[in-house]
Image (cartoon, rainbow, N blue to C red):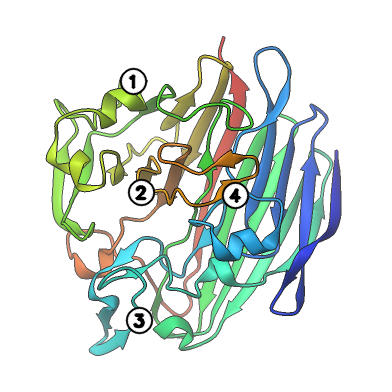
Amino acid sequence: MEILRKQFGEYKGEPVYSFTLQNNQGMKVTCISLGCIITEVLTPNKAGEFENVVLGFDDVNNYIENSPYFGAVVGRVAGRISSGSFDLDGKTYTLPKNESDNHLHGGPEGFDRKLWKAEIVERKNEVGVEFSYLSKDGEAGYPGNLSVKVTYLLNNQNELLISYAATTDKKTLVNLTNHTYFNLSGDVKTDILSHKLKLKSKQFLELSEQLIPTGAFLDTENTPFDFRKGKTIQEGITADHDQVKLVGQGIDHPFVLEENHNQEIILLDEQSGRKLIVETDEPSVVIYTSNMMDESFQIRDVQSKKYLGICLETQGLPDSIHHAEFSPCILDVGEKYKTTTKYTFTTAD
């Protein structure tokens, strides 16, 4: 196993470094110190050919100018906070609005736009990077100095573990996720419509016209959102359903996960044979089928367009601060925010 560090570019006059993790099977994961962005994941298809299975760029400027959060850690709070404000202990906090009337993914200068400190991790059976960042009291409108660590570890079982940890000196909100867009065809040969998704979820959240949870938990049964037995993305998004139409004929919804941490999410591309298994201790996952992708830029050698990738954003329920029926994403002094998601890259039998 090995890890290679080199300069990837510059951001605001500071160097951005890339870290390429490689295991003994030949799998590679590359991430950078800007936004903890995962730029590349090279995995074999059923013929043993290694190709990239995530959307990303080869230079920093594209991540700043064009990226819809490709590969990034987003925070302090993933998803939308309605009206760009919240109340905590009797005080109202105002956040910058960067999507209509709402605050999205930590705002216009969220964690995806921050330079993180990086330490290389080398152990007997795994290599990785521990990224750390101090989000100061008042940054993006949030209270408290939030000390955050995000660790990427790759082992010889072709498993990528992403661990998040945070502490604060004042009660605040935190709900972190990784916004990688997966495309298992390899080097973006096709879109993800023929990918099969299997999801252990009996309920999803209804969204308003502003894509904010209404508070209603809807049953997936007898809807396009029922992926419990596995079906293609195409089958889900071509259905005649108001919630599918709402997000531009696709999915951009939180799904409540079963609490067994056992293969909750499986993504399969039958053509290449690649299979991705996602296991998490988070209560939900936002599935986004890139149905609102800007079509004005290049993703390496491919023109951007709808349905080129699928995001599997494991997290707490979005906008929970405004819904008493959701588990609140509140972190208090003396508490530790801690969560892990494991991505296993394999091929179908």
Q: Amino acid at mark 1?
A: Lys
Left of 59 or right of it: where is 134? left
Residue to which mark 4 is pinned? 162
Question: Is the residue under label 2 in contact with that under label 3 (CB below 8 Å)?
Answer: no
Dot 2, how many residues are within 10 Å of its Cα: few (below 14), some (14-19), or many (20+)?
Answer: some
Nearer to me, 245 or 74: 245
Which disc is residue 292 wearing? 2
Q: Amino acid at mark 3?
A: Leu
In the image, what residue occupies the spot 57% across and 9% down? 349
Question: Is the residue under label 3 in contact with that under label 4 (CB below 8 Å)?
Answer: no
Question: Is the residue under label 4 in contact with that under label 2 (CB below 8 Å)?
Answer: no
Left of 253 or right of it: where is 130? right
**In the structure shown, which secondary structural element does the residue marked by tag 4 occupy?**
strand
Of callouts 4 and 3, the N-terminal one: 3
Which disc is residue 95 wearing? 3
Q: Amino acid at mark 4?
A: Ile
Disc nearest the viewer among 4 and 3? 3
Corner quadrant of residue 288: top left
